[in-house]
Amino acid sequence: MIKWVVIALVILTLLGAYGISTYQKELNRPLTDREIEFEIKRGDSLNRVADRLIEHEILDTPYWFKFTVLVEGISSQLKAGEYVARAGVTLQGLLDLIFSGAVRQHSLLLVEGWNYRQVLRTVCTHPAIVKILCDQDEPNFTAVFGVPDVHPEGRFFPDTYYLTKGTTDVAFLKRAAERMKDILESEWCDRSNGLPFKSADEALILASIIEKETAVADERTAISGVFIRRLEKGMLLQTDPTVIYGMGDGFDGNIRSQHLTEDGPYNTYARPGLPPTPIAMPSVASIHAALHPKYGNSLYFVSRGDGSHHFSETLSEHKRAVIQYQLKKTP
């Protein structure tokens, strides 16, 4: 009797060792030689998840996957979302991926200088975003800003964002708006003394103009200084980007003399002070420049045609620069 008990124990030990060895091999065996995307949907059962993994050719059998999940008692911890199984992923790696909730991140870029319609167009065509605001004929931004009647222009911070599938357009825009609000508040608290702004919103308006006026980083504070001095002296800002913004779809690439004389809230050749809203999304550099202008005496600037600008202190000097750089004549 003892002999047969010993034999049985030996057999069971060998079978157990074999089973453990096989299990360890299955846990660490590469499942695929290519990157595969798959999705676990909310409410999926363990069986349905296993079936999805087989459908995507990540698993060839559900046995070891389901065995491990059930043995470890983690079936209730399945996290919905999109996942990416990397080439060479093992069963253990796949389990770690799914139960860590490391879902796939989609990128969405908001570009500095865009207006809010360009932002909406990009958000509303993103395949990972659920459309709520986008499906409205006239988008209502109350859910985004928390209060009604907030003009959305310039209120979203330009950056590369990462989001998961199923994020709503409202949630994304609220996130971008909160980011702009936080950055603006931070920069406003650190602003230079004596600026002619009544609020941070006015600084945001000027920052948007600076953003559209130059692509040269080192010029931002100089351009800010020109506009600040003009505001302080009660001079017209006379900046083309505001006129272009006010023309909307009527802008065909050229500003003509009649456009500069037509009255309108965004025509800074006709109306004093700042326009009523920002005209684009400013970068943090432009916001900083609006609140930290370069001191000096220049009141004018003109494009050199290469992206940079010539700055002048007097109107006569500015006229000569216009002839030189815009009309291409030697003064």
Image (spheres, rainbow, N blue to C red):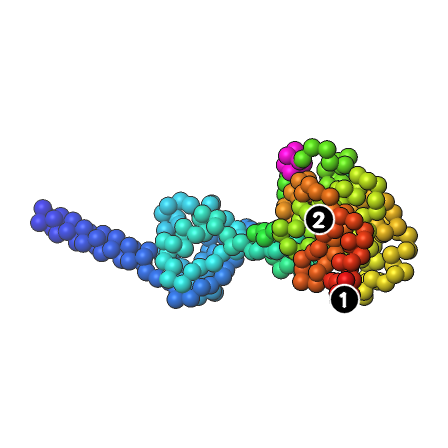
Q: Is residue 280 magenta?
A: no
Disc 2 element: helix
In this rendering, the answer to whether 133 lies above or below 290 is below
At label 1, counting other C-alpha atoms closer than 10 Å, the crowd grade (few under 14, some 14-19, many 20 or more) is few
Name the one closer to the observer, 247 or 161: 247
Q: According to the image, label 1 marks what residue?
A: 329
Type of amino acid at the residue the image marks with label 1? Lys
Q: Is residue 280 visible?
A: no
Residue bounds of the magenta highlight:
184-191
Taking the spot 35% from the left edge, 62% from the top edge, the residue there is: 30
Q: Position of residue 199 (x, y in %)?
A: 75, 36
Q: Position of residue 221 (x, y in %)?
A: 67, 46
CA distance for labels 2 and 1: 24 Å
Name the one closer to the observer, 250 or 35: 250
Q: Earlier in the sequence, mark 2 or mark 1?
A: 2
Taking the spot 70% from the left edge, 56% from the top edge, the residue there is: 309
Name the one closer to the observer, 59 or 32: 32
Q: According to the image, label 2 marks what residue?
A: 223
Type of amino acid at the residue the image marks with label 2? Ile
Q: Position of residue 306 (x, y in %)?
A: 67, 62
Taking the spot 73% from the left edge, 41% from the top edge, the residue there is: 203
Q: Is residue 318 visible?
A: yes
Please say if the residues under marks 2 and 1 sit with CB atoms less than 8 Å apart.
no
